[in-house]
Amino acid sequence: MNPPRSITARDNPLLKELRKLGTDSVAYRKLGRIWLEGEHLCSAALVRGVRPLIAVFSDAGWERAAPDLRAAAPQVVRLSDALFAGISTLESPSDMGFVMDVLVAMQPLPGANAVLLDRVQDAGNVGSILRSAAAFGVRQVLALRGTAALCSPKVLRAGMGAHFGLHLVEGLEPADLDTWDVPLIWTSSHQGVLLHEARLPQPCAWIFGHEGQGVARHWQDRAALAVRIAQPGGEESLNVAAAAAVCLYAASVAQRPQP
């Protein structure tokens, strides 16, 4: 384990970069790195075998950190508690964080289960969908242009570690998937086969759309199947993240061997 290097200047270049990564939702695209704040997210990365470039601790965080967190990165930085609080974007500042390579790939995985996000704009919804995808065995999430940035600070926090178990691609245009042969399924609040009665293809790609406009007509026309979720309570529709969780759970159940 490398001994920590102390930084005491507020205008240190690394701290300037961390402030930018923590407040600018798309800074990671230019800088090629993300800032992962908090023990929970950092531990989730290590569990998935993802190693940081730099580990940053407050004085208090260093003293209480577990050995695996202290030894996780080739570079370790230690800050005063006040200096760490100055780079934190959390309401209750954490006391550690990791600087990591960007978690986004260039190309989709061929022939693999997927979730497509069609202009889903709320960061909380995007992060929640990533969590459901990882939980229910989806291998990749593909974000079409207009979707919230997959590695923005808010999406990272909402994903709660799901990023590290997924193949992520963002900024896609419809033409980028013209040769993709995985069947698409789209959801609607008022048309399509009831989810619990549908025969779901495997592999498949679920497409979830804009919170207000839904799935674009282009994708509806390309889809192999439209499904709707039964709502006996009479609500008009479900939040997109809730609908995704229901659909991905149903798909995971359908894949299980029958007794």
Image: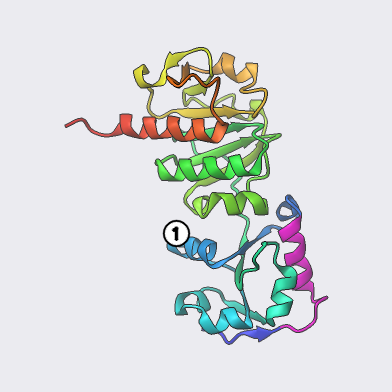
Q: In which quarter of the image is the C terminus?
A: top left
Res 218 → quadrant: top right
x, y percent for residue 59: 63, 83
**Residue marked by disc 1:** 48
x, y percent for residue 27: 75, 54
96 with respect to 12 (left or right): left
Residue at the far front in the pictured view: 233
Q: Which residue is drawn at 76% across and 54% down?
A: 24
The amino acid type of the residue labelled 1 equals Arg
Q: Which residue is drawn at 47% across and 41% down?
A: 132
x, y percent for residue 133: 47, 41
Q: Main secondary structure of the magenta part?
A: helix
Q: How is the image coloured?
A: rainbow
x, y percent for residue 6: 69, 85
Where 4 falls versus 174 (above or below)?
below
121 with respect to 181 (left or right): right
Q: Can residue 44 be seen in this view?
A: yes
Q: How many marks?
A: 1
Q: Which residue is drawn at 75% across and 57% down?
A: 23
Residue 95 lies in the magenta-colored region: no
Residue at the far right in the pictured view: 11
Residue 14 lies in the magenta-colored region: yes
Q: Give the range drawn in magenta.
A: 7-23
Q: Which of 180 and 158 is in front in this view?
A: 158
Res 237 → quadrant: top right
Q: Nearer the viewer, residue 138 or 10?
A: 10
Q: Residues within 10 Å of mark 1 (few under 14, many from 20)?
A: few
